[in-house]
Image (tube, helix red, strand yellow):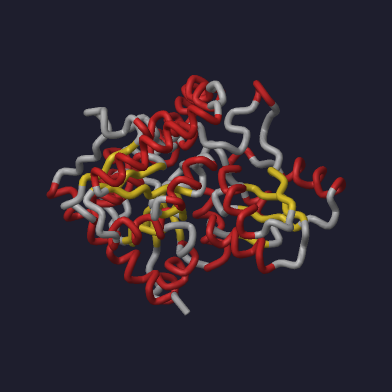
Amino acid sequence: MSIAQEKLEQIRAQVRSHLDWRQSTELTAARKDALESTIRGHLKAQNAVIVAHYYTAPEIQALAEATGGCVSDSLEMARFGRDHNAETLIVAGVRFMGETAKILTPHKRVLMLTLEATCSLDEGCPIDEFSAFCDAHPDREVVVYANTSAAVKARADWVVTSSIALEVAEHLAAQDKPIIWAPDRHLGDYVQRESGADVLLWDGACIVHEEFKSRGIRDLKKVHPDAAVLVHPESPASVIEMADRVGSTTQIIRAACELPNKKFIVATDQGIFYKLQQAAPDKQFIVAPTAGKGATCRSCANCPWMAMNDLEAMAAVFDRDDNEIHVPPALADRAMQPLERMLAFAETLKP
């Protein structure tokens, strides 16, 4: 078993304690209104804006939209935070997203709802082991997913999100450049198969997406034969093979609007359902089956760390002294280079 795989097994064991975040008492309408009022006041007083990921809770996404913030994938979150004139960015997501925001805007204050909100891909790719892996293959271009630490990004030649991963691999393959791909082995395998690139994979995985099962989707298709299957490429190959459309969160939302189907089986974090229903209110979305049900399920298509982003935590974000993102300047300078390369490359893909 690789070091990364051992780390992933540890994460699986630890994640059960995080699931309690999803089981908190539902807010009353009065309490919800009071929290939102407090948050709005803080945003105005602190010249702050909310930058939220699609996988956060619906009430977080709705508040971000209502207050002039951003709800998007990690690529657009990075762009938005960089370009917005707010002095403080409140990042509702997981820690690597906050680090990316700080690297791109070192002059801004970047706050998280909690620094405990991490990612199994980030945790499964420790910098010392990854750096040694890269050093053992010096002839390869190092491409890392956005779901990594600032230190891992600083070791890379390229940073990618799922929305441009395939295009970057095709770009490098056209130049006959062999690649190290980290940390998600499922995304890397998909990119390798689709692009034909020479890819050496790091052995990491997302605890949410690796739980989707082709057998479960096949059974669900028998119940909903007219449903199209939308799959995020962090999912296993057997699940991807069943997809009518494979893509990033933004691409999944676009597919739901473009495809004629009225029903969709969706293999990604169910936080995306808020935006899916907003974008296509006349369509039905069904969560793809995972490895278990109820208490036996590790994630149930819901990232436990994303679930740490709630209104209670948002209302207290300016009252804490342990939730600000700091990235050492020298490290940030090195990580900035592949991040800027990512953003510049993404601009070339725009129609």
Residue drawn at x 69%, y 43% as measured from the top left: 287
Furthest-left residue in view?
330
Can you give x and y, in whole percent of width and height, for residue 150 in the image? 27, 46
**Residue 146, placed above or below residue 328:** below
Is 2 or 182 nearer to us in this picture? Answer: 182
Residue 174 position in % (x across, y down): 43, 76
Q: Is residue 200 or residue 311 the one in the foreground?
A: 311
Q: Residue sitting at 47 percent across and 22 percent down? A: 14
Q: Residue at x 43, y 37 (%)?
A: 36
Image position of 335 (left or right of 69): left
Q: Residue at x 79, y 47 (%)?
A: 218
Q: Is residue 250 at least partly visible in the picture?
A: yes
Q: How many labels sit on residues?
A: 0
Give the quadrant of residue 336. Answer: bottom left
The answer to which of 286 and 220 lies nearer the viewer is 286
Q: From the viewer's perspective, tell me whether residue 301 is left or right of residue 12.
A: right
Q: Position of residue 56 (x, y in %)?
A: 49, 42
Q: Between residues 131 and 323, which one lies in front from this camera angle?
A: 323
Can residue 140 be seen from the camera position used here? no
Residue 250's x, y, as percent? 53, 59
Vertical placement of residue 173 versus 293, above or below: below
**Residue 28 higher or lower than 66, as above or below:** above
